[in-house]
């Protein structure tokens, strides 16, 4: 068994709070300041099914990417979905610790996981926040391939039925910019740093128009898919650091959208 405070400390060393965006709410969301932990459940989001999975498997701690609480709460009302979830977590003594944009920017975090998944070499941040850390990544593929081939490769690897594309992807690409999750804010940096293509989870309509105007093709992988790939890496790190603790990836953490 390990005291939960040791795990909080390890998570903050992995994803330093100072790397988080100002609007974000990383860190402890719900739970005790102390206590023993035997099992951790990893998820992208904290939903009632994920909380129930934690209770059923005996996990005392959920480590999530997205915070459970983004904005200040005026009340915790059990009649609301969020209130019901918080009541359930407290009643079952399940803590929640979230590492969102801090893990996006950290070395070995979400964007590095996405860069490795794509096969990018020598990836560096698109927007530097601290030495060696920052938002997004840019680097080069081992060899030039067409954007069409890259899209097909990622679609197959992620098990996607389709990838939303902006611009012409028929040409060759070598220099790839990326940002997991919602990456529209980094489009300008991708253009400035002469990327051949921009891979992200999602961008807005008008951002896509700007990309078209700048001649930069965009591949949208989906917000959930582009971020959840970090969980196996996080699992490996925590298992290596806390060998006596079981660390599982949630099987009930799911994409909120589907196609019909």
Image (spheres, rainbow, N blue to C red):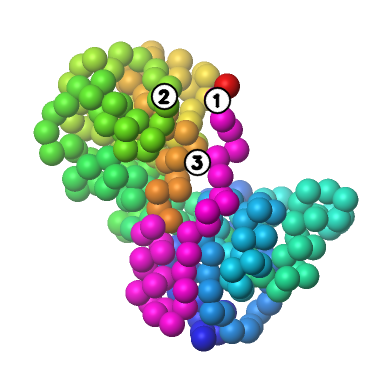
Dot 1, crowdedness within 10 Å: few (<14), some or many (≥20)? Answer: few
Residue 244: say if magenta. Answer: yes
Identify residue for label 2.
162
Pick the front one: 235 or 119: 235
Indicate which disc, 3 or 2, sits on the residue closer to the N terminus. 2
Badge 3 local density, few (<14 within 10 Å), some, or many (20+)?
A: many
Q: What range is drawn magenta here?
A: 232-259
Residue 110, how many percent across, how many down? 40, 51
* Side (left or right) of 198 relative to 84: left
Which quadrant of the rendered structure holds the C terminus?
top right
Which of the two discs, 1 and 2, labels the residue nearer the N terminus?
2
Residue 173 in sight in this render: yes
- CB atoms of marks 1 and 2 within 8 Å: yes
Q: Which residue is pictured at 50% across the width and 41% down the height?
A: 224
Q: Is residue 117 left or right of residue 160?
A: left
Residue 167, image x, y percentages: 35, 15
Residue 239 x %, y %: 39, 72
Residue 153 sits in quarter: top left
Q: Are marks 3 and 2 in contact (CB under 8 Å)?
A: no
The number of numbered discs placed on residues in the rendered structure image is 3
Q: Could you say whether the residue bearing mark 1 is in a helix, strand or loop? A: loop
- Taking the spot 56% from the left edge, 45% from the top edge, the residue there is 254
Residue positioned 38% across, 35% down in the render = 159
Question: Residue at 45% across / 15% down in the picture?
Answer: 209
- Extreme left residue here? 143
The residue tagged 3 is 224
- Secondary structure at badge 2 equals loop
For residue 100, above or below residue 90: above
Query: How many angstroms separate mark 1 from mark 2 (CA)?
Result: 10 Å
Dot placed on the residue nearer the N-terminal end, 1 or 3: 3
Which residue is tagged 1?
259
């Amino acid at each position: 068994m390990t005291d939960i405070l040791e795990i909080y400390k390890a998570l903050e060393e992995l994803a330093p709070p100072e790397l988080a965006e100002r609007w974000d709410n990383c860190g402890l969301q719900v739970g005790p300041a102390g206590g023993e932990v035997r099992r951790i459940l990893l998820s992208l989001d904290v939903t009632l099914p994920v909380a129930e999975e934690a209770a059923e498997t005996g996990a005392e701690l959920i480590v999530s990417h997205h915070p459970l609480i983004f904005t200040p709460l005026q009340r915790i009302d059990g009649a609301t979905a969020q209130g019901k979830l918080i009541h359930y977590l407290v009643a079952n003594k399940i803590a929640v610790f979230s590492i969102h944009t801090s893990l996006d920017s950290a070395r070995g975090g979400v964007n590095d996981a996405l860069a490795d998944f794509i096969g990018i070499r020598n990836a560096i941040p698109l927007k530097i926040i601290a030495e060696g850390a920052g938002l997004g990544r840019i680097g080069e593929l081992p060899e030039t391939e067409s954007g069409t081939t890259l899209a097909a490769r990622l679609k197959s690897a992620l098990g996607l039925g389709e990838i939303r594309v902006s611009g012409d992807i028929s040409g060759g690409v070598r220099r790839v910019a990326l940002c997991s999750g919602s990456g529209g804010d980094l489009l300008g940096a991708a253009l400035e740093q002469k990327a051949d293509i921009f891979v992200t989870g999602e961008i807005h309509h008008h951002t896509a128009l700007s990309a078209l105007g700048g001649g930069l093709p965009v591949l949208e992988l989906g917000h959930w898919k582009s971020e959840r790939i970090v969980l196996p890496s996080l699992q490996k790190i925590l298992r290596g650091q806390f060998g006596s603790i079981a660390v599982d990836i949630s099987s009930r953490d799911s994409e909120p959208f589907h196609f019909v």
